[in-house]
Image: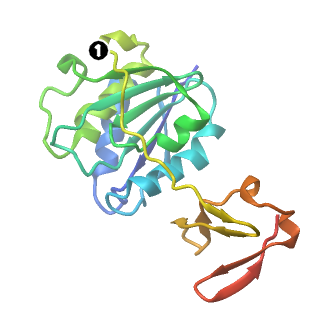
Amino acid sequence: MRRIVTLTSDFGTKDGFVGAMKGVILSLAPEASVVDITHEVPPQSVWDAAFALEASCPYFPEGTVHVAVVDPGVGGERRALIFRTGRYFLVGPDNGVFSLLLKREPPMRVVSMENRELMLPEVSNTFHGRDVFAPAAAHLVRGVPLDSFGPEVEDWVNLHLPEPEVRGDLVLGKVVHTDRFGNLVTNIKMEHLPFPPEGAVVRAGGVTTKIYP
């Protein structure tokens, strides 16, 4: 059975970065099926990547390896992690990029990637997507045990959405994401509304509109 590897990044498609990652994965695991989620995340926007992953990853089959490379801290002290949830492997930097997805899919185990034998022979300071994360995904597809990558860790970076403020019939929230169509995603959920959503209106930037559940 072919194993799926997904890629999410801020690389865009003009340059060869995504192609290099795919080449590494398919060289090490020819049986892998590589799927692009998006490479149009705004540069270094971990939040936007987190929203893209939360919106897409749950629809993939069990056993999928999800790789995210939106990595402002590349070359620094941040760790490279693999999360094992009940359904997936999540491979990427320790910067909170998987935070929203992990609320849906809590991790069962988390390891820090430290075994250089499971990376490319030469590891760049600026392209861990190719040299660290892509090889890790390929090795996971091939069935390399999680213990082989490095030690287990108990803590990692989590991003937290701010909670909305409820004042009687008024709920004050924040826009946390804007999609390419201009739709605004806020931190207000239906359960925050103290009344049926059919009776609510939204005011943002001087514009008032109804809620359409």
Q: Quadrant of residue 41?
A: bottom left
Give residue 208's position: percent from left, percent from top: 71, 85
Give residue 196's position: percent from left, percent from top: 87, 63
Q: How is the image coloured?
A: rainbow
Q: Nearer the viewer, residue 14 or 186?
A: 186
Asked if 126 appears above or below 86 in the picture, the reply is below
Q: Quadrant of residue 129?
A: top left
Q: Nearer the viewer, residue 57 or 47?
A: 47
Asked if 185 appears above or below 64 in the picture, the reply is below
Give residue 184's position: percent from left, percent from top: 60, 70
Which residue appears at 51% of the width and 56% of the height?
Answer: 162
Q: Nearer the viewer, residue 53 or 28?
A: 53
Q: Determine whether, in the image, residue 150 is placed left or right of residue 199.
A: left
- The residue pinned by badge 1 equals 151
Which residue appears at 52% of the width and 46% of the height?
Answer: 53
Check the image and name the residue furthest to the front: 168
Give residue 65's position: percent from left, percent from top: 48, 30
Q: Quadrant of the N terminus?
A: top right
Q: Determine whether, in the image, residue 40 is placed left or right of residue 87.
A: left
Q: Quadrant of the C terminus?
A: bottom right
Which residue appears at 58% of the width and 31% of the height?
Answer: 105
Asked if 210 appears above or below 72 in the picture, the reply is below
Q: Secondary structure at mark 1?
A: loop
Which residue appears at 33% of the width and 24% of the height?
Answer: 28
Q: Determine whether, in the image, residue 52 is placed left or right of residue 79.
A: right
Give amino acid for label 1: Pro
Q: Nearer the viewer, residue 180 or 212?
A: 212
